[in-house]
Amino acid sequence: MKALSKQDKRFGPSGTPRRRYRSIWISDVHLGTRGCNHRLLIDFLDHCDSDHLYLVGDIIDGWRMKKKFYWPEGHNAIVRRVMKRAKRGTKVVYVPGNHDEMFRQFSGLDFGGVEIRRSAVHTTADGRRLLVIHGDEFDAVVMGQRWLAFAGDAAYTLLLRANIAVNAVRRMFDLPYWSLSAHAKHRVKDAVAFISRFEETVATAARKRNVDGVVCGHIHTAEHRDFDGIAYYNDGDWVESCTALVEHFDGRMEILHWPSEIAARDVAGMASGRAAA
């Protein structure tokens, strides 16, 4: 079955045409946790289609689910949407991360059209080769001091709970989504320094693999940087920033911040309504 053509003009739930991209990368969804912004991700999936879909790790949070099972219907809805894409012809590649590392043992297998890989190489429309990895293998804390990684994860979970409460109040006042946890992370100098070191380390590893760039997740910070000719892309996450990396049909890459996309869509809808009145 072929992937949907670029001319397909189906509409999303908002009444706007579904967007078409050549490729989409998403990571760090953390299904199985309360921090997962499943409503925003469902909205994204209902408004965007692609020929290629890469799930770049930590899609399911096995660490959290070992402690306490949590799986609302919204998380099932995301899984159904991904499987439906694979069934209708989208090439879906799943590169597990450290939180869903239990799926790494199935690397090389195909489940319902979803290919599981330890890593992948994607060739863009303009001929560039991009290494696709989760990125945890370059995190010295996760690899060298696993107990410290779990401790940090516990503290981070508390911050995400505060994030949920803050946005529940914001919804009551019809305010757009805002990430308290992302704001706090970008205010801490040590966190900013770690992110910078991580990005440079990943780009260096990509250079050694003789590729033109790298796409990863893991650190929940969407970014596009150039390291001496090596393109570094991080697609972000769906617990803080709610971002995705997309490739247009000419090979151009773009990071979408979905809360901003929804806000712009709502403004356009209100303007259209006023014009019609």
Image (spheres, rainbow, N blue to C red):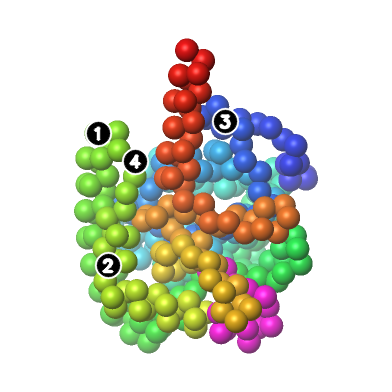
Front residue of 137 and 229:
229
Which of the numbered marks, if any, corresponds to residue 187?
2
- Identity of the amino acid at label 3? Thr
Residue appearing at x 48%, y 35% in the figure:
265
Residue appearing at x 61%, y 77% in the figure:
230
Residue with the mark numbered 1: 173
- Identity of the amino acid at label 4? Pro
Locate the N terminus by quadrant.
top right
Residue at mark 3 to residue at mark 4: CA–CA distance: 19 Å
Front residue of 156 and 150:
156
Q: Position of residue 204 (x, y in %)?
A: 56, 84
Front residue of 207 and 72:
207
Residue with the mark numbered 3: 16
Residue with the mark numbered 4: 176
Residue range (magenta): 203-216
Q: Position of residue 248 (x, y in %)?
A: 67, 53
The secondary structure type at the circle numbered 3 is loop
Q: Is residue 106 left or right of residue 66?
A: right
Labelled pair 1, 2 in contact (Cβ < 8 Å): no
Lower sequence index among marks 1 and 2 = 1
Which of the numbered marks, if any, corresponds to residue 86?
none
Residue at mark 3 to residue at mark 1: CA–CA distance: 25 Å
